[in-house]
Image (cartoon, rainbow, N blue to C red):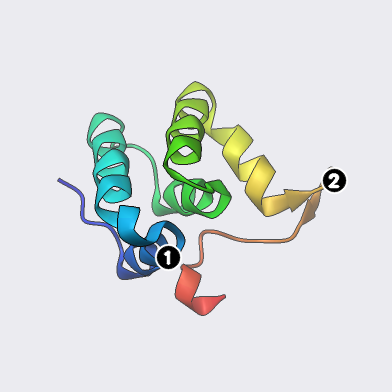
Amino acid sequence: MKELNPDIIYKMKLKFGDKFSESKEILLNFIEQNDSFSDRIIRCIIFISKDLESLKNQIEMTKIDWRDIIAYTEYYAKNNRVRNFNINFSRK
């Protein structure tokens, strides 16, 4: 099973607080079933998620087309990149 990078764990603890364990379990289940997704995609999912329900919704959207989550989180307007989630959260 894939281990989550420390920067992802840290961001999830900040974002989900007392729901961290549940959010981690949801994310790890997703990764286990879809091991081709990179840390970049995982960071995008975490960034855009507001709560556990949103996390589940973002995961479902990512399963349909992972490019959408990158467009929603890394780009503003058409081609203006404002974030790069290839870089870990701690370096931002």
Instruction: Looking at the image, tell me whether mark 2 or mark 1 is earlier in sequence order.
Output: 1
The label shown at residue 77 is: 2
CB-based contact (under 8 Å), mark 2 and mark 1? no
Residue identifier under label 1: 11
The CA span between labels 2 and 1 is 26 Å
Q: Nearer the viewer, residue 5 or 24?
A: 24
The N terminus lies in quadrant: top left
Q: Position of residue 43 (x, y in %)?
A: 47, 54
Seen at 60% across and 44% down, the residue is 70
In this view, which residue lies farthest toward the left?
1
Quadrant in the picture for residue 29: top left
* Secondary structure state at the residue bearing disc 1: helix
Q: Nearer the viewer, residue 15 or 18?
A: 18
- The answer to whether 51 is drawn above or below residue 15 in the figure is above
Q: Is 41 displayed left or right of 67 in the figure?
A: left
Q: Amino acid at mark 1?
A: Lys
Mark in front: 2 vs 1: 1
Q: Residues within 10 Å of mark 2 (few under 14, many from 20)?
A: few
Q: From the viewer's side, name the closer residue of 61 and 85.
A: 61
Relative to 33, is 16 on the left or the right?
right
Judged from the image, the secondary structure of the residue bearing numbered disc 2 is loop
List x then y, in percent, for residue 45. 49, 46
In the displayed structure, 17 sits above or below 70; it is below
Amino acid type, mark 2: Ala
